[in-house]
Image: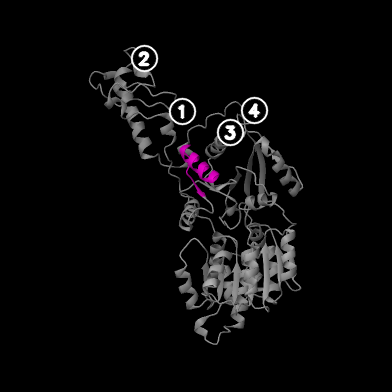
Amino acid sequence: MSDSFARLGLAPELVRAVTGEGYTEPTPVQAQAIPFILAGRDVLAGAQTGTGKTAGFTLPLLQRLAVHGNASPSPAKHPIRALIITPTRELAAQVEESVRTYGKHMPLRSTLVYGGVGINPQIDALRRGVDILVATPGRLLDHMQQKTVDLRHVQILVLDEADRMLDMGFIRDIRRILAALPKQRQNLLFSATFSDEIRSLAESLLHDPAQVQVARRNADSELVAQRIHPVAQSHKRALLAHLVLSGDWHQVLVFTRTKHGANRLAEQLCKDGVEATAIHGNKSQGARTKALAGFKDGSVRVLVATDLASRGLDIEELPHVVNYELPHVPEDYVHRIGRTGRAGSTGEAISLVAPEESALLADIEKLLKRKLVREAVPGFAPGTASPPQTPPVRREQQGRRPHDGRERRNHAAADAQRSRSNAHAAPRQAPQMRPIGAAHAVAPAHTAAPARPAAPAHAAAPARPPASAHAAAPTRSATQARAEPHVPALLRGTPRRAG
């Protein structure tokens, strides 16, 4: 089992770390790239997301640094000898975690620098000395300007998801960083896809590179089942809530185009009874970390994200990705759906497509070179006057404990039902509650006893206040009832997958 990695030329310490993480066979990109990197060659590698690119460059990088030893005149300083640049904070954190995981049996130090958090702890870590630095471009430039980082000893440069960095406008930052590096170094470019701009950058950066391509350019994963749900723009939120609740989905990554749209959708889903939160570039790093942690541990059911999260989010066995809005750039569709169907697991990618998005869909299908399956959901197809109401959540199906407030109201309603035969003895029992979705609240129990006529019209009119405060206090509107939060069940742990 571990012989599969040993045959690639990896050191016993790395093979032991890989085996300890439960990995038995290298992925195609690892099997092809690792020998080239160990041989010291520049590499241009492209592969679908979730195929193990991170381990593909991390494992041989660790070995090369360990074999060559510390080149510093003062070993205690541990000068930076490997620099890994990533486009987002989340991806940087995951890469640095992989460095620590695979290098735990080696005397190498690593640290992480990115924006959105205080710079002083990062300065302290750099002063203590690190062998491997994982960074985002903007924060690395901050350190360069403050002269708190020394890149003169870098032997290996890795640009991870380089095409995304260009999409995000980092090309000038990248060139400024490259100018500060030694000219003699090993260069590695890893990415899910390669645009023409990236190939142009590779030509100026790489020297006689070995090319690794385990999938055609901009290919979507065969492990991801894709389908289109045609729907009117105004009915998208109702359809999303319907799919999540009726399908009993526990972990859903939803993409919107804008940060404001992500915030608004997350708030509306919470009002619909679906636990949701948003993650995007305007969120503080603490808020982004908290949102991602809640999504992974199951306390958040739906994570609404912008394309910031289309790269860098590594969620083990994520079952569902939803394009609430199609991206303007067709390649971003591939990156979005690549969050599911990772490391050999299957996944499902659903796009809610309004008629006005037909041109965007045509561009995506042109890129994929195939037509995606259309499947209209009854009651939600374009032209429907109003979408059907989503039924209440089946808690016994979800395996969740009812919310305490809902449980108390149910008990109160049952008590009111039993007390109707003795209305005179208990004239102030709590009112019976209608099911979620009822148009109006029911009159209090003492006015609705079976032997008596219905409550007067003035008591039932929704525009007027209740007759007495004690009778109105326990009554809640249908909207309030729907807004009750649900307590999600914890997802069962899954084994870690190759990064």
* Secondary element at tag 3: helix
Circle number at residue 437: 1
Q: Earlier in the sequence, mark 4 or mark 2?
A: 4
Q: Are marks 3 and 2 in contact (CB under 8 Å)?
A: no
What amino acid is found at the position of numbered circle 2 in the picture? Ala
Q: CA distance from mark 2 to mark 1?
A: 21 Å
Q: Residue at x 55, y 43 (%)?
A: 261
Relative height, residue 264 to residue 68 (above, below): above
Residue at x 58%, y 83% (from the top left corner): 69
Residue 290 visible at all: yes
Label 1 sits on a secondary structure element that is loop
Whole-Å distance between the Cαs marked 1 and 3? 20 Å
SS category of the residue bearing label 4: loop
Quadrant containing the C terminus is: bottom right
Q: Is residue 24 in view from this perspective?
A: no
Q: Going by the image, does 187 lie left or right of 299?
A: right
**Displayed quadrant of residue 373:** top right
Specify start and end residues of the magenta stretch as a single range: 260-278
Answer few, some or many: residues within 10 Å of disc 3's Cα (few below 14, many 20 plus, some between 14 and 19). Answer: few
The residue that mark 3 highlights is: 234
- Tell me how far mark 4 sits from mark 3, CA to CA: 11 Å
Residue located at (51% from left, 82% from top):
77
| Colour scheme in use | one colour
- Please tell me in which quadrant of the rendered image residue 443 appears: top left
Find residue 383 and name its label: 4
- Please say whether residue 374 is one of the residues in the magenta stretch: no
Mark 4 vs 1: CB contact within 8 A: no
- Spatial separation of the CA atoms under disc 4 and disc 2: 38 Å
Could you tell me residue 366's position as x and y percent? 76, 46
User: Pointer 2: what residue?
Assistant: 457
Whole-number angstrom distance, CA of label 3 to CA of label 2: 36 Å
Q: Which sits in the foreground, 312 or 262? A: 262
